[in-house]
Image (cartoon, rainbow, N blue to C red):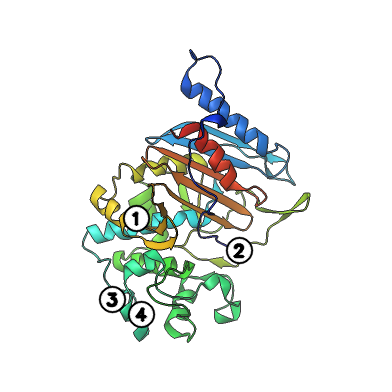
Amino acid sequence: MFRGWLGRSWLIVAVASALVLSGCAQDPTAEKRAASTEVFEAVVPDDTPGCSAAVSIDGDVVWAEARGVANLETGEQLKTSTAIHIASVGKQFTAVAVLMLAEQGLLSLDDSPADHLDGMPAWVEDLTINDLMHHTTGIAEFLRLPSSNFGAPPLNNDDILEFVRTSPIAQSGTPGAFSYSNTNYTLLADIVTEVTGVEFADWMQAEVFGPLDLEARIGPPMPSDPVGYEAVVDDFMIAEPFAWEVVGPGFVTMTASELARWGDQLRAPSLVSAETLDDALADGAPVDEGWTYGPGLLVADDGTLGHDGAGAGDETSFAVSPDRHTTIAISCNHDGLHLPTVMNDLAAVWVD
């Protein structure tokens, strides 16, 4: 299942006491790399399912580390080059695609989803694409519903679209209020497909990942991907595989280093204008004290950006510092590590 937002314990805070540096003549970046590796080795064993992490500054990866096992049966080790499913962290890519199309005049954020998706019920006409992006539609979360509401597995975008078109429970929440629902981003991907005439995954490869030279894949797991594990007491068991093939809310697989490189698009965007991005980040829906939900990202009142995600045993945490110069990404092929703590510890090393 996708988890939709960072826990409240997550907050980038530079804690000077967390990093003890010796020898003032040493290279500060080298010291930070060594401190980051020490943080990582303390929480990620090398003989269990593991994690990969990376830090970038202005788009350049300055530290990357991987520890642990990608497949317990074969003993294959995780590497920094190992791509891991990042789940809901991928929502920001979908949001940027929508912002790109808005800048191109192919849609407006104030359009109703019904303007682009045929057969929508009357209540959808009162919603906007901005509502989808900010989770303020009241549309039901498909991951929380019995599979009997949809077609035969694997569940796909067409199944969810038909559910919204026909089900009396498709809008179970209150329009205008924040309520995290992966269904919203499924519909955004459908709108991208309808507006461009190109399947969502193909369009993203051609217009987002390709131009940025980012290695990323949208689609189902492949046999070569790390196995996802659930932590059970002192052991790990293989997580239940996906019962869906849904694009838009996530379903992106990439390395932590590539994800960290991507973070610089939130400082110096090249796919959309800085004005469009800043407007989208400033126009978020209130989530909790000090946080709003913007374009596929949580936005803190100090300027911190972030999101987390989890699915089929994989977990990822992504954050950009308030000044947007530093990005930290952590991806694991198990759910047994408290990523907010690791994120805080790495942020204490790198964020001034």
Q: Are dots 1 and 2 in contact, CB under 8 Å?
A: no
Residues packed near mark 2 inside 10 Å, few (<14), some (14 to 19) or many (20 plus): some
| Amino acid on which disc 1 is placed | Val
Identify the disc placed on residue 242: 2
x and y, in percent, of residue 87 in the image: 52, 56
* In-image side of 242 versus 113 (left or right): right
x and y, in percent, of residue 60 in the image: 41, 33
Q: Which of 68 and 179 is in front in this view?
A: 179
What residue do we see at 35% from left, 60% from top? Answer: 284
Q: Name the residue under label 4.
A: 124
What SS does tag 4 mark? helix
Q: Name the residue under label 3.
A: 115
Q: How far apart are marks 1 and 4 (CA)?
A: 22 Å
Q: Earlier in the sequence, mark 1 or mark 2?
A: 1
Is there any visible trace of residue 332 in the rendered image? Answer: no
Residues packed near mark 4 inside 10 Å, few (<14), some (14 to 19) or many (20 plus): some
Q: Mark 1 points at which residue?
A: 96
Q: Earlier in the sequence, mark 1 or mark 4?
A: 1
Q: Which of 349 and 270 is in front in this view?
A: 349
